[in-house]
Amino acid sequence: MERDLSIPDEEVRFDVSSAYDGLRLDLFLKRRLPWRSRNFIQSVIRTGRIRVNGEHIKAGRRVFDGDVVTIELEPVDPATIKHADIPITFLYEDEHIAVVDKQPGLLVHPVSAQLYNTLINALHYEYRVRRGESDVAIQLGHRLDRDTSGVLLISKDRGVRRSVQGLFEKQRAEKAYLSIVHGRVERDRGTIDQPLLSDYRETGGFRTTVDPAGSPSRTEYEVLERFPHHTYVRLVPKTGRTHQLRVHMLHLGHPMLCDHEYGRETAIRAHGSETILLERQALHSCQLGFEHPVTGEPMVVESGPPPDMAAVLEALRSGRELVAPPDAEEGGHRHARVV
């Protein structure tokens, strides 16, 4: 029976592998939960909510290959579980796979920092509760960042999981994205071929940079529409590095609009209006091409620009100036005219 992610977990489990053999418990958990400080982990150990093979042990006790570490989770207020309220737009579905149009601002999978109210939780609720299909085996074929919207492939059948994952691991899936970037991209099309290096930061999240020591990374781009101070582009990643498209466009000198991590501002609105048009990176997965894992049929699933990016494009096409609200400005960029 598959684990039901529509129901809150009571504990989190970690199996100790040979790579962690002999490590102190607190250091082991720090490796598995890098966004948590060692002091925080030690404080949780003292509460008695962490066990090794069912026994309470101290932070300095060592763990060994084959041990099982469990963390008892604090009770969850049912009112905070919003799985039923998360809308899911299906672009394609059969008995083996589904393709959804992910909304921006939605985490795709639970992590220790957020165990509930993610896309996978909502999908479990859709199938197990609404449809009563208790044996469905939902698994993501790939990932999209929380603030990236668009096409996402999901396996529904244990028998096709490896085939679906293999599409992306072996780069047999063709992905394309839409983005709005700062500045006028002069060349109609081109290739960004720069190695990328990603590190997890103590403050949480990955930070990716162009670095000769990084992994080979390549992105193709095509200009779809130019505006006085921005450009609407189509991006095709030829490798799958963390934050690849965002960092490659930054390296090209054209950061994405409203990219909180690599961009110039965190939100934009039309000059003279208080309505926020966009407050997440302007990046949308618009197309996914792949062979069906069972039939072998070539498939192409598409999704047009989402409402927030469409609103920005409409404003640009009408010649309206777009600016960053005062509380959304970063790095001294007071006027952020939109792509």
Image (cartoon, rainbow, N blue to C red):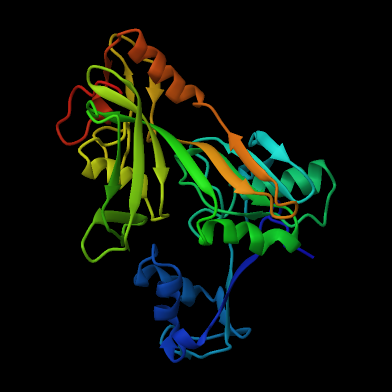
Residue sitting at the far left: 332
Residue lying at 37% horizontally and 55% vertically, measured from the top left: 205
Viewer-closest of 134 and 41: 134
Q: Quadrant of residue 157?
A: bottom right
| Total marks placed | 0
Residue 211 higher or lower than 255, as above or below: below
Left or right: 241 with respect to 48? Answer: left
State whether residue 200 appears in this view.
no
- Quarter placement of the C terminus: top left
From what the image shows, is residue 31 above or below residue 203? below
Q: Residue at x 53, y 56 (%)?
A: 168
Where does residue 143 sit, x and y in percent of width and height? Answer: 52, 51
In which quarter of the view is residue 254 placed? top left
Name the residue furthest right: 132
Of the pair 285 and 291, the residue shown nearer to us: 291
Please state if 302 lies on the left or on the right of 27 as rendered. Answer: right
Visible in this render: residue 258?
yes
Looking at the image, which residue is at 26% across and 53% down?
A: 194
Relative image position of residue 144 (x, y in whole percent): 49, 47
